[in-house]
């Protein structure tokens, strides 16, 4: 059966719950470009939902995985260990902005990293409670959904969820929540719902991705650190999407004068290969008993080979610095359009993690306008993905290795799609 025919029969073959944006099938991809089966070219500003900071098939990642594939593909690290697991963990331990000595463990998906970070936090503190924040996204597993601060589509029809998970407001001027409001709500949570002595951890993204590219205000992160220290609560930074060079630093937490106890990583950690990690303070990471962490494919050798190459690429090609430069270029281009595109309410960014929010004349979220922009861009050969609490934010997660001429072409397409939608 021809693959395009398969695509047309998608609803007969796969469940409705697996949503798909593009109406074509990819044939091949390199760096920030991909081609469909008819040879049509697209510029990729979705980057595998942030998993391709080093681009599609970076030559060094490709070579590292090929070398590992010639050696062995799998043993299960818990049965027969291998040097790559230890050497990549050692690299992360040295690089992570963790206070004191760090240790790392590897898993397969971002949701797995989050689940294991929670297991570690509960084992270390002996407490059950977890506090997440409105708009945060932490995965599609049962615990991941419970922690996620957005109902549709992630929680719809899947409850009930786990107990002892609470949500506090995220400080955001667009949502009418000030820093003082957010901190006061946290005090009320301790007063009304859970004793802080029962809370194992706060968990939050330093920059909310699915929530609409909303960076945590530095003062709020510092306040959370103070509250955590006061009550013996751990601070978990979920860097699954915002980590590994995306924000202009290798770790997003490097932007804050406050250290996390545990950091979760995935997505661009391994350049598109399935790998996640939990990095944390050694005494915290050592709390679970032997045998309680792991997984059959946790720390897969092929993915670890990719991660080993990615860490070197981040340094050798100065990708965090490049993220800052590209993000600034994009934000400047978009800000210049605000008078001509009144629906363009705000451009938010930290480094190369850029969110573009649309609202109508009454200040309401304008999802219809986003869809027009997205469709117009796709028709011109640019992939854009949405996000935000109300689905009215475009997330720009382009490969940080994108060539400048391709980036300029993408900006021209984005501008044309915005102006056409506003006309």
Image (tube, rainbow, N blue to C red):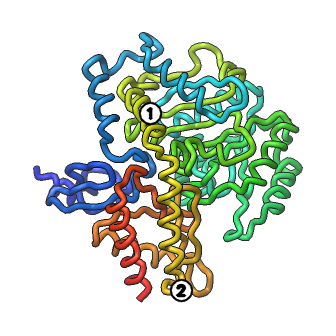
Q: Nearer the viewer, residue 58 or 20?
A: 58
Could you classify mark 1 by the number of other residues whose Cα lies within 10 Å: few (under 14), some (14-19), or many (20 or more)?
A: some
Question: Residue 312 shows which numbered tag?
Answer: 1
Q: How many marks?
A: 2
Of the residues tagged 2 and 1, which is closer to the observer? 1
Q: Nearer the viewer, residue 215 or 140?
A: 215
In the image as oriented, which residue stretches furthest toward the bottom?
423
| Circles 2, 1 touching at the beta carbon (< 8 Å) | no
> Is residue 48 at least partly visible in the picture?
no
Judge whether 50 appears above or below 294 on screen. Answer: below
Judge whether 139 appears above or below 178 on screen. Answer: above
Which residue is denoted by mark 2 in the rendering? 339
Q: Mark 2 vs mark 1: which is more N-terminal? A: 1
Could you classify mark 2 by the number of other residues whose Cα lies within 10 Å: few (under 14), some (14-19), or many (20 or more)?
A: few
In the image as oriented, which residue stretches furthest toward the left?
1
Left or right, 265 with respect to 54, comes to right
* Residue 274 position by quadrant: top left
Q: Nearer the viewer, residue 390 or 217?
A: 217
């Amino acid at each position: 059966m021809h693959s395009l025919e398969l695509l047309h029969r998608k609803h007969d073959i796969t469940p409705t719950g697996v949503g798909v944006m593009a109406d074509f099938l990819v044939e091949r991809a390199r760096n920030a470009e991909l081609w469909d089966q008819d040879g049509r070219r697209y510029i990729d500003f979705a980057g595998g939902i942030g998993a391709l900071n080093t681009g599609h098939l970076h030559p060094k990642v490709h070579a590292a995985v090929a070398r590992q594939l010639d050696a062995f593909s799998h043993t299960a690290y818990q049965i027969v260990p291998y040097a790559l697991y230890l050497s990549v963990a050692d690299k992360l331990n040295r690089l992570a902005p963790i206070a004191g000595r760090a240790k790392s463990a590897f898993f397969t998906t971002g949701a797995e990293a989050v689940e294991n970070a929670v297991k570690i936090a509960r084992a270390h503190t002996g407490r059950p409670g977890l506090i997440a924040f409105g708009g945060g996204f932490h995965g599609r597993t049962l615990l991941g959904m419970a922690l996620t601060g957005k109902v549709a589509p992630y929680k719809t029809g899947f409850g009930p969820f786990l107990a002892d998970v609470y949500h506090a407001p995220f400080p955001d001027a667009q949502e009418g929540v000030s820093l003082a409001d957010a901190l006061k709500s946290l005090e009320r949570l301790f007063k009304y719902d859970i004793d802080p002595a029962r809370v194992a951890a706060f968990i939050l993204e330093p920059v909310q991705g699915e929530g609409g590219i909303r960076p945590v205000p530095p003062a709020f992160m510092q306040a959370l650190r103070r509250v955590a220290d006061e009550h013996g609560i751990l601070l978990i930074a979920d860097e699954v999407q915002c980590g590994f060079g995306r924000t202009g630093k290798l770790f997003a937490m490097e932007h804050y004068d406050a250290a996390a106890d545990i950091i979760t990583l995935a997505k661009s950690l391994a350049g598109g290969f399935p790998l996640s990690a939990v990095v944390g303070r050694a005494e915290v990471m050592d709390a679970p008993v032997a045998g309680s962490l792991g997984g059959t494919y946790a720390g897969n050798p092929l993915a670890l080979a990719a991660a080993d190459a990615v860490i070197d690429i981040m340094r050798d090609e100065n990708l965090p610095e490049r993220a800052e430069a590209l993000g600034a270029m994009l934000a400047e281009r978009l800000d210049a359009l605000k008078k001509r595109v009144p629906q363009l309410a705000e451009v938010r960014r930290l480094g190369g993690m850029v969110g573009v929010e649309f609202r109508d004349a009454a200040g309401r979220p304008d999802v219809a306008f986003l869809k027009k922009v997205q469709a117009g861009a796709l028709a011109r050969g640019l992939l854009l993905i949405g996000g935000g609490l109300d689905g009215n934010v475009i997330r720009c997660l382009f490969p940080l290795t994108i060539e400048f001429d391709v980036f300029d072409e993408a900006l021209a397409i984005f501008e044309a799609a915005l102006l056409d939608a506003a006309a």
